[in-house]
Image (cartoon, rainbow, N blue to C red):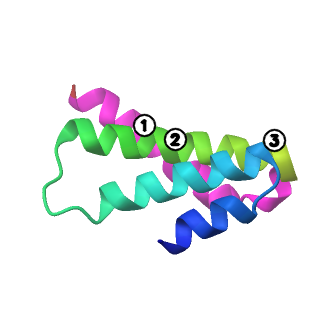
Amino acid sequence: MSSAVVLYDLLEDEIDQQILACFVRACSIFVSKILTPYLLEEAHQLVIKLLRLVEEAYGKAKISDFIYSKCDGNQRYITKKK
């Protein structure tokens, strides 16, 4: 049994489970041997969803402005490349 599964079972709040699920999936994409534009877009969307979930559950103060600026900048870059 992986540590992510054990941690998921310990989390009682559904939003925390969603945060963990987004984090684990995004990380698994980022460390995969083959990255496609589709997978990078999926990982990017997962990170944005994760940030929104953290903000919803714990407040914007828990998320650095630096992270927001990087996500917004990447979104513009990805949109221009399509």
- Determine if the magenta segment contains residue 68: yes
Q: Secondary structure at mark 3?
A: helix
The numbered dot on residue 57 is none
Image: 23 above or below 14: below
Residue kind at label 3, given as amino acid type: Glu
Q: Are marks 3 and 2 in contact (CB under 8 Å)?
A: no
Q: CA distance from mark 1 to mark 2?
A: 5 Å
Q: Secondary structure at mark 1?
A: helix
How many other residues sit within 10 Å of disc 2, few (<14), some (14-19) or many (≥20)? few
Q: Are marks 1 and 2 in contact (CB under 8 Å)?
A: yes
User: Which residue is labeled 1 in the image?
Assistant: 75
Image: 24 above or below 52: below
Q: Quadrant of residue 30?
A: bottom left
Residue that sits furthest to the front in the current view: 1
Would you say 40 lies left or right of 51 here? left
User: Which residue is labeled 2 in the image?
Assistant: 72
The answer, for residue 43, to whether it is visible in the render is: yes
Q: Position of residue 49 (x, y in %)?
A: 59, 39
Question: At 46% across and 38% down in the image, what residue appears?
Answer: 45
Q: CA distance from mark 1 to mark 3?
A: 21 Å
